[in-house]
Amino acid sequence: MPSNQSRSSVGFTMMELLTALAIIALLVGITMSVVVHVRESGRRSVCLSNLKQLGHAFHMYLQDYDGTYPPAMRDSSDRSAWVAMPEPFIMLDRPAQPENGSIYPYVRNSEVYMCPSDPLGRQIRLSYGMNNKLGTHPEIIPNARESQIYNPSGVVLLVEQPFNPFYHSPAFAAGGLRCFMPTQPLPCYPEEICGEPYFPCGCLGQLACRHSGRSTNLLFCDGHARSFPSGGVKLGMFFPYRTNDD
């Protein structure tokens, strides 16, 4: 029959084993969290690099087209937009056509149109949207000229935008100033911010805050790209002219 001393020794050994297992599990959890964070930081860096490459492509396009920006979107038969769109719009089974867009000859790499943090990026072949206030159609929003933009380092050119299953295009509509102040933050998907009344106010554009801390990446008209936290992107950053018009 084992002595009390033997039972106490065995019990102490089991406690040591359980403690060691708990510490190992904790260390594995911490390590995995660090690995996930590092991996996402790498993806965010790639996404920022993509935007900078696209910004360089826009700069070369502007040099060739007398400083006039390409349309943010046009119908499928018009290849003048920065990214071409299938008929009638981008869908999961009808992806975007960056190779047919006006910016592609200056970048020649369809990979830069897709953010690695975007779960649908490769399927729809596009993770970014162009600020539609820089131009869509001559009779709706004429294409902006580089010389007209009052603050190129503060006016957004491209954003990360979420996929809209009802109507997705290469253009990003931030919203108007009729019902919102320029300092109004844009929401992160799936949050919605809509004006009252809905007509004519509508809703603000939703950003894809895909990165750690619910951050999102933006490209500005001067070619620089940076990351913003949730709530850090303001409506006024999308207006290229000194005006309060929608």
Image (cartoon, rainbow, N blue to C red):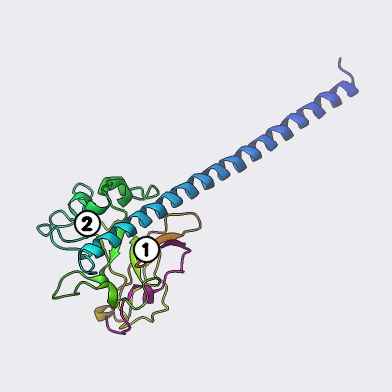
Residue, disc 1: 223
Mark 1, residues whose alpha carbon is within 10 Å: few (<14), some, or many (≥20)?
Answer: some
* Observer able to see residue 202: no
Residue 13 rendering spot, x and y as whole percentages:
79, 26
The residue at the point 40 percent across, 67 percent down is: 187
Main secondary-structure element of the magenta-colored stretch:
loop
**Left or right of 189 on screen, residue 77:** left
Q: Nearer the viewer, residue 134 or 178?
A: 134
Compared to residue 99, the image places residue 150 above or below, namely below
Label 1 to label 2, Cα distance in Å?
A: 18 Å
Tell me the quadrant of the picture where the C terminus can be found.
bottom left
**Left or right of 215 on screen, residue 65:** left
Circle 2 — which element?
A: loop
Residue 147 rendering spot, x and y as whole percentages:
28, 75
Residue, disc 2: 83
Tell me the quadrant of the picture where the N terminus can be found.
top right
**Left or right of 30 on screen, residue 142:** left
The residue at the point 22 percent across, 70 percent down is: 135
Q: Which portion, as a residue range, is magenta?
A: 224-246
Residue 242 rendering spot, x and y as whole percentages:
33, 83
Residue that extends furthest to the top in the rendered view of this protein: 1
Magenta stretch encompasses residue 99: no
> Mark 1 is on which residue type?
Gly
Residue 62 occupies quadrant: bottom left
**Left or right of 156 on screen, residue 91:** left
